[in-house]
Image (tube, rainbow, N blue to C red):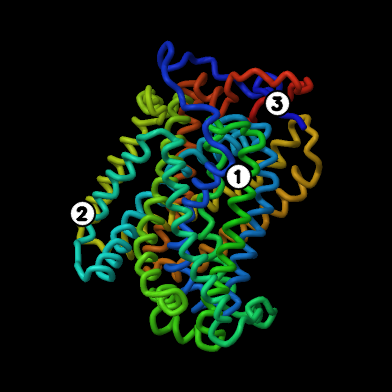
Amino acid sequence: MTAESGARNGAPQHTAPPPGEGAPALRTGTLGVADIAFFVVSAAAPLTVMAGVAPLAIGIGGIGAPVGYLLAGATLALFAVGFTAMTRHVRHGGGFYAFITRGLGRPAGFGAATLALLAYNGMQIGVYGLLATGTQDALAALWGIHVPWQPIALGGVFVIWYLGYRSIDFGAKVLGVLLVAETGILVLLAGGVLLHGGADGLALDSFTPGSVLVPGTGAVLAFAFAAFTGFESTAIYRREARDPGRTVPRATYIAVGFLGLFYAFSVWIVIQAFGGTKVLKAVATDPAGLFFTATTHYVGAWAADLMHVFIVTSILASQLAFHNAINRYGLSLSQEGVLPPLLGRVHPEHRSPYVAGVLQSVLALLVVAGFALAGADPYHQLLLWMNTPGMLGLLTLQALTAVAVPCFFRRIRHTEGRWRTRVAPAAATVLTAGALWLVITKIGLMTAAPFGTNAVLVLTVPAAFAIGVLLALRIRRSRPRVYAQFAAEPPEPPEPSEPSVPAPSAAPD
């Protein structure tokens, strides 16, 4: 297996000096497989997805909804084949934009970078609306009190800023605890349903063709693909990972496999809790209370109370994971010379990109305050209007990366094999593009917004990419050195055991 250095694979090397002599950098060798997997799975917020979105998927797709999550997981596992193969050859910490640059050229890479900033910020900032409504629901259910959503959302910004300001290993520990809590409550529900045999006895009719091949399956797939957002961020933590050549691929497969199986199992469990003939009536009556009602019946009211609390912590965990990802994108682009050098500063003690974290938190404050002053609804406007272009942006980046993988491997010498470098990426390209189109066509089900609003939300994605391409053309004229070194490999010497290989061409223009 070959893992080329920048010099050997023809990618330009970073030659610019560091921000300062002896300037602090990210803490290397800190994150293991479990740590990175915690970041990725936490970004997906499994408890929030199940309690908040899965009932809608059941209502639209019927009892065959679990298969939608399995199909989405299988598609993204196929995408991960080429994605993880490329992580062994591209050591840059820029994630998607570095991969797309190396496969499709620098203009596409710049477009991917601006789209990634839009997508991750949209996902992270929009969820403050969900944090506000989730906290309101928890306070009302537990103590019967009502708190306006604005102070909850604004307070959440400061909490996430502080957790991101601390060291990455501290954040991994926090996410580990929160993830165990949110998945643990669903495991309790599953145990209760399985022990009692469900409402009408356990059945596997959710997986029969007659239950799956129904008109609502396309919408279920759209919801399912949206539930996996953030899993690709494993590559962003490469510089902080232990043995990244093995850690990043393993964390990616674990995250995708866990989410796909856990989502499908949890949806099947809640269907069994009510029974296949009654679950649709329960969804129509009280979709938001579906999991709470099942938990109260099969486990106890105390567990339903805990579920309210853990939904809030699940949302916080998701925001922290996205916040950390955004900060590392900002750090990387600053070190590229694209963003101001100030964003490239790393905290001397915590080794976190703290300036980028401050800027992202200030942006979140401004956006949340803007929605609050406008009298917007925290869920239907702050959450959905921000998250929709974010989710579409991440799906677009996945599709572009799938295209970039075979283009990259055609230009270098490697020993990865046709399955990893051609067959799986080609299939992933078709499937991820299909998933993106499916989500766009079903966008009205997700936003419940008028056509004009949905059109603006969708068109924001190509607009962000186009801005990046125009920026690339401008930098190529005005700052050719920055352009030439964009997404360059870090100056890391090769491992002694690695064989030497001929130098292929640099990233295409």
Residue type highlighted by circle 2: Pro
Residue 151 disc label: 2
Please, is residue 305 above or below residue 366 in the view?
below
Residue type highlighted by circle 1: Ala
Picture quarter containing residue 378? bottom left
Number of numbered discs: 3
Residue of label 1: 251
**Circle nearer the viewer, 1 or 2:** 1
Q: Secondary structure at mark 2?
A: helix
Q: Secondary structure at mark 3?
A: loop
Q: Work out how far the residue at label 3 is from the one at label 1, CA to CA, in angstroms.
A: 21 Å
Picture quarter containing residue 489? top right
Please, is residue 447 above or below residue 114 in the view?
below
Query: Does residue 287 appear in this view?
Result: no
Nearest the viewer among 504 and 224 is: 224
Residue of label 3: 4
Query: Does residue 288 appear in this view?
Result: yes
Which circle's residue, 3 or 1, is located before the other in the chain?
3
Please, is residue 454 above or below residue 218 in the view?
above
Which circle's residue, 1 or 2, is located before the other in the chain?
2
Residue 459 percent coordinates (x, y): 45, 55
Q: Residues within 10 Å of mark 3 (few under 14, many from 20)?
A: many
Q: Is residue 245 left or right of residue 458?
A: right
Residue 312 percent coordinates (x, y): 35, 58
| The N terminus, quarter of image | top right
Q: Work out how far the residue at label 3 is from the one at label 2, CA to CA, in angstroms.
A: 50 Å
Residue 347 percent coordinates (x, y): 37, 26
Residue name at image x 49 percent, y 24 percent: 477
